Image (cartoon, grey):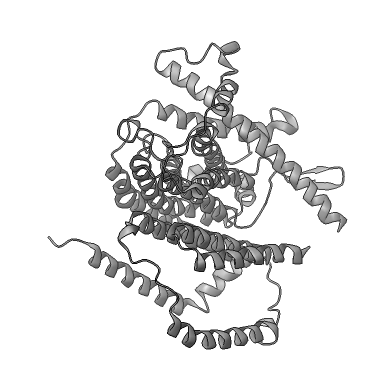
Amino acid sequence: MEWVIFGFLGTWLILSALGTVFVKNPIHVILFFLSALLAMSAIFLSLGAELLAGIQLIIYAVAIVVFYVLAITTIPWEKIKRFEGVYKNELFVASPILLLLFIFMSYMVLEGEFAKPSGTVEDNVRELGKELFTSYLFPFEVASVILLVAMIGAIVLGRKEE
Amino acid sequence: MEEILYSLAFTLVKVLVVFLVALGVGAYLTWFERKLAGHIQNRLGPNVVGPFGLLQPLADALKLATKESIIPRGADKPVYYMAVIMALVPSILLLALIPWGPPFRLGDTYVKPIISDVNIALLLAFAFGSLSVYGTIFSGWASNSKYAFIGSLRKAAVVIAYEVVLGFSVLGVVLLAGTLSTVGIVEAQVQRGVWFIVYQPVAFFLYLYCMLAESGRVPFDIQEAEAELVTGYNVEYGGLKFGAFPLAEWYINVIALSAIAVVLFLGGWSGPPILGPLSPYFWFILKTFGLVFFTIWLHWTLPRFQAKDITEIAWKILLPIAILNVIVTAFFVYFF
């Protein structure tokens, strides 16, 4: 039963990721991207990581993608550069690196550190909150400051000079 | 294996019941809304089809179903059709998170009158509530019409602003209840014997504002402002496709958000047992209906805000109040 669900969600995720890369119309791309995010959140949910699933939905699928959609729908695409073929040099440089990364990550997932079960957690919302605000408080706060700086920067760049 | 199949079948039954009842109630709310609007404006409302016009929703559905299906030239067809689904599905999914009554025993099984009792129900509720914005945006974009597109952009701006306020306004309740599960929040209120509206009156009013904004009701219905935008994002849709948008946004979404307001602030199913075992359901539905009535009542009473006022109210007034409310609540929860 578990494998049926995982197979379905995995296929969904891979198909939407391929669609995101290969489809040409920008609106269809963002729709495939949205579908990939939904599939990802469904996988989290099926693995029992409810909080991650919820945050994936509310932050990525809603808050962030809405801004992408707003930007993409208002840009006049007729005036933008068209598709001009596959970038060959970049492809040759990138593919061995990606292959290495993939092998490394598969090893981690199948044999290495990630493969070990981390013990059962009863209420992962509570546990995650505790971890985040005790063990990982400093990185968490640093991340929030970085986001704040980025936000102020965006406002400064975006406002008109008077 | 048998147990899984059994629970699957049981869930399917619950889904079917909630789905069909919600669609039926959604359809009949159109009748109720028109009747109420008629009386507010000193008219009679629908009264020709059937007694008291009770068959009017069926007549409307028949009329919509027999309309010719017109698609504007230059429309993006797959997105155009998908937008209808993207508008309907999140609103219906919201109903899966609502606990209609307390858990009870049926024979030797333990029955929960809620479709999915997840421990992050509240997060999911806000996620679904805001996912419905994609239906609006893409319907406006795919119809290749300026009116529709302006309407959808306005809606997107409103939803982004009010989603933030909504999240912060509810945090107070989450702090008090100590859980994100809808069942847990109601049980926390039943245990204390106090509805959270007593502790969180400010949050309740903020929630009402956000509920009206997210469901596109007056005074926040700038995305369909009839006088300037015809009807906004759904202007290029016809037939039952047109019917789906108001059904999702104005009726099912309002029912679901009202029910969540009842869960959060009005004690869910709690109330004096006047109907025996059925009284929890009675109280839940009565409270939900009260809020739906309030929404419709406002719709036919107030004028609408300007587009820029709505987002300014959200960011400059409501959000600071919401954050202040969270801080004060956290202070009280920690020290008392």
Q: Position of residue B325 (x, y in %)?
A: 40, 53
Residue B103 lies left or right of residue B125; in this view the side is right
Instruction: Note whether B21 is above or below B106 in the view shown.
Output: above
Instruction: Note whether A9 is above or below B27 in the view shown.
Output: below
Whether residue B28 appears in this view of the structure is yes
Instruction: Note whether A65 is above or below B151 in the view shown.
Output: below
Residue A147 lies left or right of residue B293; in this view the side is left
Whether residue A55 appears in this view of the structure is no
Instruction: Note whether B169 is above or below B67 in the view shown.
Output: below
The residue shown at (61%, 53%) is B181
The residue shown at (43%, 79%) is A87
In the current view of this chain or complex, which residue is farthest to the front?
A: A85
In the current view of this chain or complex, which residue is farthest to the left?
A: A162
Quarter of the image for residue A66 reads bottom left
Q: Nearer the viewer, residue A24 or B280?
A: A24
Q: Position of residue A94 (x, y in %)?
A: 49, 85
Q: Position of residue B321 (x, y in %)?
A: 35, 51
Q: Nearer the viewer, residue B69 or B153?
A: B69
Quarter of the image for residue B101 reads top right
The residue shown at (79%, 47%) is B9
- Work out which quarter of the rendered image holds the N terminus of chain B and state it: bottom right
The residue shown at (87%, 47%) is B108
Residue B133 lies left or right of residue A105; in this view the side is left
Q: How many marks?
A: 0
Q: Position of residue A22 (x, y in %)?
A: 51, 67
Q: Nearer the viewer, residue B246 or A78?
A: A78
